[in-house]
Amino acid sequence: MNRFRRVILTAGLAAVLAVATTVGAFARGGLSATVDRDVLTTDDILTLTIVVSSSAADAPKPQLPDLVGFTVAGSSTSSQLSIVNGAVSSSVAYTYRLQPYETGTLTIPAFTATIDGQTYTTDPITVAVSQGTGAATQAPGNGAGSLQAPAKLGNQDLFVEAEVDNPTPYVGEQITYTFRFYEAADSLFMPSLFMNQPSYSPPALTGFWSEGEIQNESYQVALNGRVYTVTELRSFLFPTAAGEQTIDPAQVTVPGFGFQPGGVLQSEPVRVDVQPLPTGAPAGFTGAVGQFDLQTELDVHETSLDEPVMATVTLSGWGNIGTAGDPVWPQSDGWRAFTGDAQVDTVVQNGRIGGTRVYEHTLIPIEAGELTLPAVAYSYFDPSAGEYRTLTTAAETVAVAPGPNGELASAAVGSNAPTDSAGAGDEVAIALQPMPLPATLTMAKAPLTTQPWYWAIWLMPLAALGTGFAWQQRQVYRLRNADAIRRSQAHKTAKRALARLPDSGDDATVARAGRILTDFLAVKLGRPIAGATAAELTATLSHRNVSPALIAEVTGTLAAMEARRYGMAGVSGKGDVRVEIEGLIGKLDREL
Amino acid sequence: MNRWTKVILGACLVAALLTGATGLFRAMPGRAETGRNATATAIQAAAQLYAQGDYGLAAQAYGQLIDQGYGNVELYYNRGLAHYRAGDLPQALTNLRQAALLAPRNGQVRAALAEIAAAAPGAASVQAPGLYGTLAALSSRWLTHNELALLALGIWTLVVGGLLTAMLGRGGDTRASG
């Protein structure tokens, strides 16, 4: 083969390869297969990506054909599920890292998959492989390249870890929660070899709003001298409350195999310090956090009376688009506005959640002339800048021609909302937004008025009032009947006084006992007795119908005690005095 | 230690054990965790349905949370809006009125109720006639049922306390003059 023919052949081969690769890049229906390069050496890694798109939530996995001349050095899978206007579509990308071990022209056969009842087939892909130098290179775009060995990995066969990409987000700012499951490729108990695959239990996400499906990817990586297959699961979260929030541990349940028992691997809890949004939010701020853009578009700028104009407001960008508040359509003279529901389309791209919220406003001019549609404003918080921003569209002018009969104003001016229920409140509904729910709901409490203790408390002041009234009446009674009370209690008072007498039995004690008796008599008779003579006392007691024998006993006792006071004999000791006086008082109390 | 002291100490010990066991049962992680997870999932599902425009289903989802015994004003408010968006004005008003009873000073709830009531023909008022109805409407505009009950109890206590003070003061005067 001369040199010219070799040049021609090489050019032809290169052209064939380029065409084949380009053709392979275009999908047939919902299936596509692409490679990242078409010329490589045996040192290089070829990345083959097969994308399956389906209108079902679970797109089928295509069978990998025999890849002659290649070894599969690794694989990963990423999936995306989107729901637009209730229509579900999914897209799964299977990425294979292929290392050629043969030189020459290698062909990746066609892939076949049946999607939504229809069979799709890709074109074969041909690549040119030359001999390398033996120095392996990293495949481009391999996410595992930057993965560091976890500190606690050690030499474990199985390991899990969890982390968030931003531990101090603002309320409403997107963060990515990543859970990694490491399986040592050289382990005899590699769970991927088991009949039952490990099952993942996501953590409770109290305090967070989860948006989108869980993204998954698997790849192989060398850590601590061992090759691990890493399955990475990513969830996109939006904190809903400020303060320190904790994402509970996620779990992987590894089934048992043979004599090897199963087990549960649990990640560490992840703490997130959620910052509140700064104060000074603009008046129209409804909780949107991210980076957004706002556009308004009219379908026509010239119309006639009662002929509707469609205004489309599109809010797009990255952030909590699913829960962002709606832009408020401003009231404007000369128009009746009807707002349809928002069409929300969310996308996941490069680990970020975003999308669009599209609102269609039907505007009916009710006046002829040059009418202005005011600007639409929308405020959001930009977490990267740490400040609020307000988007404002330009005001639009619409030329409204008079009606077909020349009228300048519609009969609908001043009328109520349309009669159909769906549109009845659309003008109102635009200002009505749902409230964000707290992370923890509270149980409904029965009204206080149904609680017995509540009414018991009502009775307590009444009870206090009644007690006060009774106490007051008692005090008044005691005040008005002080003498009678004293008389009725004279016996008891005298007995108490006698009990308090000392045991000495001396003259002083006898004198005190005598005073107790005379005091008793004074209270009972209502007059002082101390200075009275025996005759006066006898007369007084007789007047009160006291028996003569008792009168004699009283006067005798008083005389004896008086004699004792003055050192005369005839009266026994102290014990006798007390008993004697007590007995005497008892008798007097019965007769007086 | 006498017999009564032992009885009282024993009763305290039994009460403490019962209280501890009850608290332990209530704080069992599985039980609490399951409830929290289910509630969080239900909240997310309801909000997602609303965001997607499935207002009827969103109303049902909020209703399920209410039926589980949760009583947050946000639940009634959001269910009211979901009913309203679904075109069910009577149910929307019922739920918004309940939200207004729970949070009478919440401007957002009041505004929504007023606007939707204005949009619903024949649903202007549920106020009882007469002075009582007017007072009830006025009080319910500012106070919740429980706040009103506590206020009434406070006024009752003050009135009776005043009467008691006056009565006892008069009694003191009587004694002094007596």
Image (cartoon, coloured by chain):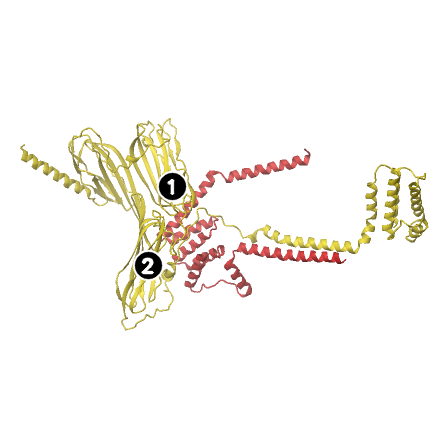
Please report whichever mark, 1 or 2, sits nearer to the chain's N-terminal start. 1
Residue at far bottom of view: A406
Screen quadrant of the N terminus of chain B: top right
Dots 1, 2 in contact, CB < 8 A:
no
Q: CA distance from mark 1 to mark 2?
A: 35 Å
Query: Which of the 4 image quadrants contains residue B86?
Result: bottom left
Q: Which residue is mark 2?
A: A376
Chain bearing mark 1: A
Screen quadrant of the C terminus of chain B: bottom right
Q: Which residue is mark 1?
A: A167
Measuring from the top left, give residue A531's x and y in whole percent: 90, 50
Shade of chain A as shown in the rendered figure: yellow
Measuring from the top left, give residue A261's x and y in whole percent: 39, 28
Going by the numbered disc 2, the residue's amino acid type is Val
Q: Secondary structure at mark 2?
A: loop
| Category of crowding for the residue at label 1, using alpha-carbon neighbours closer than 10 angstroms: few (below 14), some (14–19), many (at least 20) | some
Whether labels 1 and 2 share one chain: yes
| Category of crowding for the residue at label 2, using alpha-carbon neighbours closer than 10 angstroms: few (below 14), some (14–19), many (at least 20) | some
Going by the numbered disc 1, the residue's amino acid type is Pro
In the image, A118 versus B124, the foreground residue is B124
Query: Looking at the picture, does residue B114 appear above or below residue B19?
Result: below
Chain coloured red here: B
